[in-house]
Amino acid sequence: MEILSSLKPYEVFSFFEKICSIPHGSGNTQAISNYIADFASERELDYNQDKLGNIIIFKNASEGFENSEPVMLQGHIDMVAVADSECKKDLSSEGLDIAVDGDYIYARNTSLGGDDGIAVAYMLALLDSDTIPHPPIEAVFTVDEETGMNGAKNIDLSICKSKRLLNIDSEEEGVFLSGCAGGASFQADMPVTRENITGSLFTLKISGLHGGHSGMEIDKGYANANLLITEIIYSLCKKTHVYLYDIQGGEKDNAIPSSASASFIMDEKYTKELHSIISEISQRIKEKDSGFCVTESDRKYTSAECLSSDDTKRFAELILNLPCGVIQMNNNGFVETSANNGIISCDKNKITLRYSVRSSSDSEKNSVLDKMSELCRKCGLDFSVSGIYPGWEYKSVSPLRDTMIEVYRNLYGSEPSVKAIHAGVECGFFAEKISGLDCISFGPDIINIHTPEEKLSISSVQRVWNFLTEVLRNL
């Protein structure tokens, strides 16, 4: 029994329901890739399926569009497959139990995969239709976007001719994404030599900060717990000898850390200065991080293997000098370049720092990485750069965006929101592979993506379908 059979446009929701019946979590996309390949074969459409499971399907122009430039449609075929504690389903081998609640489609006890199943449904519906006017279409289906964009990174687009790309992988109707950041992970390891120190061992923990995504929320002014705990240590180093025993903070390099802790030996007579430093920090950040809290564990007089006071100060100076936060805005008011100290970890022999560096300009991204590398080199740290992905620079001139804005005005009677986001999307790899690519990312409303509470708006899917087909008529 079809759950979505009464919904219109039937062709879109029918394909979406079929997609939901095929397991397609990241890393488990062969079945859905084969389904799309079979779809193309059955309709005698030219297609290419690579060894990763990426697929490109070609469809000739409809009557009257034979001389039009081709357009590329793109979405990813994997989903974040997660379930709640009550779910008994094996998402690696079973489809989703979808249902309708008012204006929303959801999956019982699991994520829905509207990101990016609805893009796949839109593209299949367009490829299946003989009545929708359109230029030549190159429909690109990529794998494993959610776990590093490996499909987009490795797909061969040399067989494609399009210079225009409609990426259907945004989750807010009426928002046209026109640029994104590229990025990389930066890791530095500071070798440490420990010595036996006797004195009062202080243990501090910072908690209650807002935290957040180091791309989407880097410009919100939220404090970084790793920097704050280091600032406390450095401020004390300027007043007395401090011997660092341990420091830990953050869980992911692409998340602004909301908590951190440190243990160090210091003369107890500087306790008043410590509290004064904490109070000053609290006053400075309370507007954005009202939940800021510093707790001190019971102090004890002990002996411990600590860093020397010189190495403690050198470590703190390094962190406070390495780039962190918003580094540069572009002329359109979007964050262009940033760095985030996401992790500090400490063991017996070294302290490890991990950063996420982002920029919509590859040259600016490389400049930041070079600066970080040089600082670490001077301080005798080992460092490495990994996970590099390209940015998608915002274009002040975009005929595709102009056309989409005009179509949006005519259909909606209002203006869309044009944005660049400070996070990575597949468009960055496509822009890197196709010189001069004109690209926009858009999509219908999806809420609570990547969670069992995910919901896809039916009415938004309908409006965006009308919008998409009208854009194709005007290209």
Image: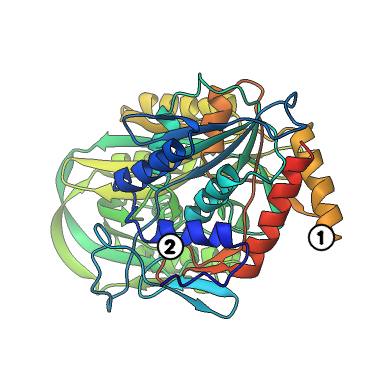
- Note whether 394 is above or below 237 in the view shown: above
Mark 1 or mark 2, which is nearer the start of the sequence?
A: 2
Gap in angstroms between the C-alphas marked 2 and 1? 40 Å
Residue 41 x/y as whole percent: 42, 36
Q: Which amino acid type is marked by label 1? A: Tyr
User: What's the residue at 43%, 31% (across, down)?
Assistant: 153
Left or right: 397 as drawn, with respect to 329: right
Q: Mark 1 points at which residue?
A: 412
| In this picture, residue 308 sits left or right of residue 377 | left
User: The C terminus appears in which quarter of the rendering?
Assistant: top right
Q: Where is residue 455 in the image (x, y as percent from the top left)?
A: 51, 70
Which quadrant: the N terminus? bottom left
Q: Nearer the viewer, residue 205 or 357?
A: 357
The answer to whether residue 13 is visible is yes
2 vs 1, front mark: 1
Relative to residue 408, is residue 290 depicted above or below?
A: below
Residue 257 visible in rendering:
no
Residue 315 versus residue 467 in the image, above or below: above
Read off the residue under disc 2. Answer: 258
445 and 287: which is toward the camera? 445
Q: Position of residue 387 (x, y in %)?
A: 38, 34
Q: Do residues under tags 2 and 1 come within 8 Å of each other at their CB atoms?
A: no
Q: Which amino acid does label 2 sit on?
A: Ser
Kind of element beneath mark 2: loop
Q: Quadrant of residue 112?
A: bottom left
* Mark 1, secondary structure of its residue: helix
Where is residue 184, by image quadrant?
A: top left
Image quadrant assignment for residue 109: bottom left
Residue at 37%, 63% (x, y): give it: 270
